Image (spheres, rainbow, N blue to C red):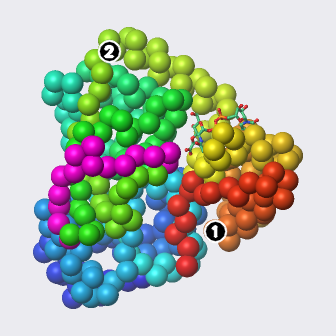
Amino acid sequence: MRIDAQIAEKLKGLGVELRAGVALADLTSLGIGGATDELLLRRYESIPEVMRLLKSEGIPHRFLGGGTNLLVMDGDLPFVVLHLPSSQPGMRVEGGAAYVDAAADLGGTVTFCAKRDLGGMEGLIGVPGSVGGALRMNAGAYGTQIGPHVREVELYRDATGEIETLKGDDIRFDYRHTSFAPGDIMLRVKLELPPKPFKEILAGIRVCNEKRRSSQPLNQKSAGCIFKNPPGGSAGRMIDELGLKGHRVGDAMVSDRHANFFVNTGNATSADMMKLIGEVRERVRVAFGVDLENEVIFWQN
Ligand code: EPU
């Protein structure tokens, strides 16, 4: 989708940098997705006005975080993509709290806090993506979730069309799910973290990194786990037990390292990946009577 020149001019006046015709394949960890215009929101305070403009002009839009948990359709996308600039995200520590821009890299944030003797997030070290994406999904690994550390979130709220600050207690953080609305845009977060000597945090980080390296396909294009784990079960183990590691549709393949990771081995299309996901879900349903729920977010038609 292309923004016309007149609207582009108005957006520029609101501090938006327009990047025409970017390929989502280049902005997502799966390396899949068609092209559209990307709007970089450089001025947070004008976001409500940008959103009003897009709505009044009837321009469909979606917000892109780190792009690490996303399967985007191919072709000319019927929506523009909004993005926060991530080059120099704000991060500071004051007392036992860290104040971080949502565009910051999650792993970078864990390290930044560790160096200032604030721990508690060791398990999140290898989770790819932005802090905003981690908040929205309540990212977790190795017994740690981000939700319990959240004290405040500054966000653009779709329901009111304004920038607001929510208290941590007013947000529901469940397993890979939160009470944020799809149209909300995370801007900044205050995290409260337990004090811990850097050396101790580093030891924890090393253990998690090692576990991850030994069980996940880190050097291949993926979106992490495709399915949520069903209550009390493991999607990866079930898919593995069905002998589906290495099963492929075109260049989309069930990882031979971790069966809940589906990798793009070359030029997988969105349709290949969707077909593979559908096939595996059906095989699990027939064999185990379990309807797996997607963990990955789909931007399809
Ligand atoms: N297993 C297999 N075969 C496989 C994969 C796993 O038998 O191919 C078995 C393992 O041996 C283990 C069990 O299944 O006994 C669980 O596996 P693992 O420890 O790898 O954890 P997981 O439940 O598959 C979850 C998260 C991951 C997170 C890890 C580590 C979900 C859907 N996945 O995976 O998160 O990194 O725990 O804490 O909750 C993600 O969210 O994208 C993600 C990758």
**What's drawn in magenta, residue-wise?**
161-176
Percent position (x, y) of residue 83? 33, 62
At label 1, the amino acid type is Ser
At horizontal 38% and vertical 25% (from top left) the residue drawn is 120
Q: Badge 2, how many Cα within 10 Å: few under 14, some, many 20+?
A: some
Total numbered badges shown on the rendered structure: 2
Pick the quarter of the image with the C terminus: bottom right
Q: Earlier in the sequence, mark 1 or mark 2?
A: 2
Q: Is residue 238 above or below residue 12?
A: above
At horizontal 18% and vertical 52% (from top left) the residue drawn is 165
Left or right of 84, for residue 2: right
Does any portion of residue 245 appear in the rendered image? yes
Left or right of 12, for residue 218: right
Q: Badge 1, how many Cα within 10 Å: few under 14, some, many 20+?
A: many
Percent position (x, y) of residue 152? 22, 44
Helix, strand or loop at disc 2? loop
Percent position (x, y) of residue 127? 49, 39
Pick the quarter of the image with the N terminus: bottom left
Q: Is residue 231 located in the magenta-colored stretch of the structure?
A: no
Q: Is mark 2 within 8 Å of ligand 1?
A: no
Q: Is residue 171 located in the magenta-colored stretch of the structure?
A: yes
Quadrant of the rendered structure where residue 17 is? bottom left
Q: Is mark 1 within 8 Å of ligand 1?
A: no
Q: Is residue 173 above or below residue 108?
A: below
Percent position (x, y) of residue 4? 30, 87
Helix, strand or loop at disc 1? helix
Residue at the spot of label 2: 196
Q: Is residue 92 above or below residue 115?
A: below
Residue at the spot of label 1: 270
